[in-house]
Image (cartoon, grey):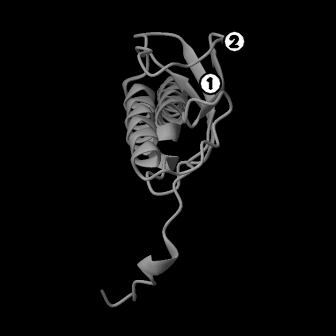
Amino acid sequence: AAPLLDDLATHQSRSQSAMLFSRDRLFNHRTFNGLNTTGSYEFDLGNPSDREVAQQLLRINRWAVEYAKAHGQLDLSQRGNYQGIRNEALNGHPFEFKADWILPDNGIFATDFFYSIRIPAEAGVTSQAA
């Protein structure tokens, strides 16, 4: 009976490790809020879940840049280019993010993101019933 219990304990331990690994690999996907994107991020670009969230963040950034320019909003970016991407690094090496930067297939992309769009005061408050 002891070998069977040892096999069961080993299987449980492996299953728990796999669950923790899966949860860790989905962390950015589970915690990303597209309605409140300001924050610090670290993406493992080889992880499909992290890569998708990084792509979403870059799409939101492109939209926010164009919106801010079209509506004459102040440029609050770190480098005077309207970009919300700040303090960016790839594999621990800082670089300057530009609009034409292409997300690599692998590596660790770390960045802070600042969403500068302000809701106009005349927009009013939406009731919870809506």
- Which of 76 and 22 lies nearest the eye of the viewer? 76
83 to 72, vertically: above or below: above
Residue 47 in percent (x, y) is at 43, 21
Q: What amino acid is labelled 2 in the image?
A: Gly
State the SS at label 1: strand
Residues tagged 2 and 1 counted as in contact (Cβ below 8 A): yes
Residue appearing at x 52%, y 36% in the figure: 16
32 to 103, vertically: above or below: below
For the image shown, how many numbered marks are present on the structure?
Answer: 2
Q: In this rendering, would 106 be left or right of 113?
A: left
CA distance for labels 2 and 1: 8 Å
- Which of 72 and 66 lies nearest the eye of the viewer? 72
- Which of 120 and 35 lies nearest the eye of the viewer? 120
85 to 93, vertically: above or below: below
Q: What amino acid is labelled 1 in the image?
A: Ala
State the image quarter where residue 130 is shown. Answer: bottom left
The residue pinned by badge 2 equals 92
Residue appearing at x 48%, y 29% in the figure: 18
Q: In this rendering, would 105 be left or right of 20?
A: left
Which numbered disc flags the more N-terminal residue, 2 or 1? 2
Residue 82 in percent (x, y) is at 55, 36
Residue 78 in percent (x, y) is at 68, 32
State the SS at label 2: loop
Q: In this rendering, would 98 be left or right of 55?
A: right
Q: Residues within 10 Å of mark 2 (few under 14, many from 20)?
A: few
- Which of 47 and 23 lies nearest the eye of the viewer? 47
The residue pinned by badge 1 equals 110
